[in-house]
Amino acid sequence: MKIEEFFPEFVRKVTIDGKNSFQNQFARRIEMNSEIKLPQIPWEEDNTGGKEPVWRYSGNPIIGRDGNKISNSVFNSAVVRFEDGFAGVFRCDSRSISMDIFVGKSKDGINWEIEDEPIKFEGADEEILKREYRYDPRVCFIEDRYYITWCNGYHGPTIGVAYTFDFKKFVQLENAYLPFNRNGVLFPRKINGLYMMLNRPSDNGHTPFGDIFISQSKDMEFWGRHRHVMGTIKDDISAWQSTKIGPGPIPIETNEGWLMIYHGVINTCNGFVYRMGVALLDLNEPWKVLTRSKNYILAPWEQYECMGDVPNVVFPCAALHDKESGKIAIYYGCADTVTGLAFTTVDRLLEYVKKNKL
């Protein structure tokens, strides 16, 4: 598949301008997304007096339920650095409660403008382009492009995969798995020459079970070499993650391993409660867990997390990371209704997961 087939305007622009070669244009994108420097990362200093591993932005929620003209709710969404600001793919459930994903742009990562029309995908196979529903996207920059993964309806939930260079045209690839699967999360680089994707096999409903697995691919189309990463904790030692778990944002590479922020669920007499945890995975064999947190790092405490269309939910889907300072900005869904922002650092999470390990 040639890039010129799907992005002719972009290729022509690079040629007409005569200022940058096609390769130089992508080299700039790679430099901007290398995570070496991210000076304009959204940030607020710790407002908990050092008591918590993660702290909330004082202006939460950053996106209300009316994020665009048709939305009933905006949550479980993903953002990345793009050009001189940020771009994202947002889950917006409409006022008919149709689930779809939309492009959003921001200069500061806090104030967002979300398009009113959902993403229109292109691709070679009309069968794959058929839409049932789309939700809970992640965005990952790998090599020269932005990959989007999401829960894609195809006779049940599976993982849709697409890519874009400009957040205008989106090329959809084959679904990664057979139904049923959710929470497809790519690693930001190849490991041992292979693309890696975390995922959680599920059912066709609200899934009262679920472990995290990893799958591998040479070409982003055929996925195999599936490995179990970690499962739920069935006894009282860590009950907040006793029913199901699932990967959250794109894993963050550190000298000690991959930091994986994830969600954990307990089934209570009032229904599911979603909390946020952290684990450290091996750099070269990321299906091997070096340590994971016994205690959660964030739970639904605030009103906008406890009250909404689905109460008692914090659901992380994206994390911006500044490698130089170690700062992390986490974007998470609140009560399946609005979008929140929280902060931490690499050192803070590493210290926490070691002190509170299972």
Image (spheres, grey):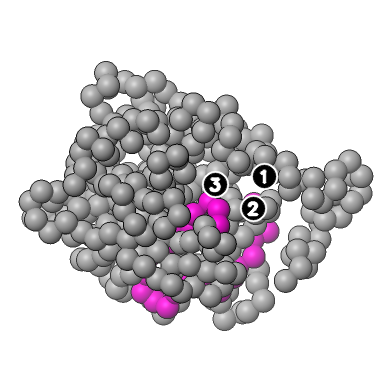
Residue at 65% x, 38% y: name it: 32
Q: CA distance from mark 3 to mark 2?
A: 18 Å
Which residue is tagged 2? 143
Which residue is tagged 3? 88
Which label is found at residue 103?
none
Residue 139 lies left or right of residue 207; in this view the side is right
Q: Position of residue 191 (x, y in %)?
A: 52, 57
Q: Is residue 296 above or below residue 210?
A: above
Q: CA distance from mark 3 to mark 1?
A: 17 Å
Residue 201, picture quadrant: bottom left
Q: Nearer the viewer, residue 204 or 148?
A: 148
Nearer to us: label 3 or label 1: 1
Residue 202 lies left or right of residue 273; in this view the side is right
Mark 3 or mark 2, earlier in chain: 3
Kind of residue at badge 3:
Gly
Q: Position of residue 199 (x, y in %)?
A: 39, 63
Q: What crowding class fits label 1: few (fewer than 14 Cα within 10 Å), some (14-19), or many (20 or more)?
A: some
Q: Helix, strand or loop at disc 2?
A: loop
Q: Is residue 339 above or below residue 187?
A: above
Residue at 54% x, 63% y: name it: 194
Q: Helix, strand or loop at disc 3?
A: strand
Mark 1 or mark 2, earlier in chain: 1
> Is residue 316 visible in this depiction of the protein?
no
Q: What crowding class fits label 3: few (fewer than 14 Cα within 10 Å), some (14-19), or many (20 or more)?
A: many
Kind of residue at badge 2:
Glu
Q: Is residue 335 above or below residue 197?
A: above
Residue at 25% x, 52% y: name it: 264
Which residue is tagged 1? 30
Stretch of the chain drawn in magenta: 167-190
172 within the magenta span: yes
